[in-house]
Image (spheres, rainbow, N blue to C red):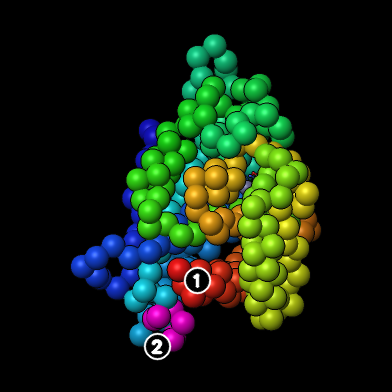
Amino acid sequence: MFYDNLQQPQLGKKSSSAKPAIFMDCGIHAREWISPAFCQWFVREALSTYGTDTQMTSLLNQMDVFVLPVFNIDGYDYTHKRNRMWRKTRSKKSGSSCIGADPNRNFDAGWCTIGASSNPCSDTYCGSRPESEIEVQNVANFIRNNKSIIKAYITIHSYSQLLLFPYSYTFELAATHSELLKVAEGASAALRSLYGTRYTSGPGAATIYPAAGGSDDWAYDLGVKYSYTFELRDTGRYGFLLPESQIKPTCEETMLAVKYIADYVQKNL
Ligand code: 0X9
Ligand code: ZN
Ligand code: ZN
């Protein structure tokens, strides 16, 4: 049994013309459970604060937000039923007994050149070709088809408390590096204001490690000007096994950072 990841809520006030939009996904990596929890939290917050929270109201009046709550559904399911530490998709590959590819190494952005493996048994296997994974192909098609309206791409991972932006496939700085950094630092400060959680901002290659084939770099090179990868709590004490007591505070503080980015994008359309 396989699931598809095509369904996604679209949040925003109804409008006769197409509005500029933000695309956000969660659960690219199966074991990063705080990530799908955040997308779910975001949708609930958006629906319940529209009309009372001035920022959310103005955001959803002017823009649409596409939320993909679980990018890698088969992998996520597998972490519930078989192996809590699974990361990849669950696709089969002929000629190998190993399963799955790393969806965040499978995008067409410097594909498989650095920080990725061509060994199907590796946890960072880049796949047999760019977009070989159906989940990646679905999302890439959706973003390509809505390219003219998608102004920001946000992808939620864990853990390490980082706010990353392009590039990760090269140490070269993005053309709009200083703006990406400025917005990331503003978002990190907003996040920290709630519970004092410290985030580090920077380009992926220098801040975490070089790794090609990621969704953030791919979206940026497609022309989505604001492209961010969050690595949520914690810094390693619990890692992927973040205790239940931290779900709510993590979602609340992350909300402030995502709203900061959305607000900046909305004011700079
Ligand atoms: O390695 C990744 O895919 C991300 N870290 S994680 O621990 N969640 O696996 C970081 C992604 C940064 N962006 C790119 N490498 N493009
Ligand atoms: Zn479960
Ligand atoms: Zn991840």
Residue lying at the far left in this picture: please name it: 16
Q: Position of residue 196 (x, y in %)?
A: 74, 77
Q: Amino acid at mark 1?
A: Asn
Q: Is residue 187 above or below residue 135?
A: below
Decide which of tag 2 and tag 1 comes sooner along the chain.
Answer: 2
Residue lying at the far front in this picture: please name it: 175
- Quarter of the image for the N terminus: give it: top left
Q: Is residue 130 magenta?
A: no
Q: Position of residue 118 (x, y in %)?
A: 65, 23
User: Which element carries disc 1, helix, strand or loop?
Assistant: loop
Q: Is residue 67 above or below residue 187?
A: above
Q: Is residue 126 above or below residue 267?
A: above
In the image, the residue with mark 1 has its CB under 8 Å from the nearest atom of ligand 1: no
In the image, the residue with mark 2 has its CB under 8 Å from the nearest atom of ligand 2: no
Q: Amino acid at mark 2?
A: Thr
Q: Is residue 55 magenta?
A: yes
What's the residue at 70%, 75% (across, down)?
A: 189
User: Which element carries disc 2, helix, strand or loop?
Assistant: loop
Q: Position of residue 231 (x, y in %)?
A: 66, 57
> Where does label 1 land, which residue?
268
What's the residue at 50%, 53% (across, down)?
A: 224
For residue 52, the mark is 2
Q: Is residue 51 above or below residue 234?
A: below
Left or right, residue 32 beside residue 130: right
Could you tell me what secondary structure mostly forms the magenta stretch? helix
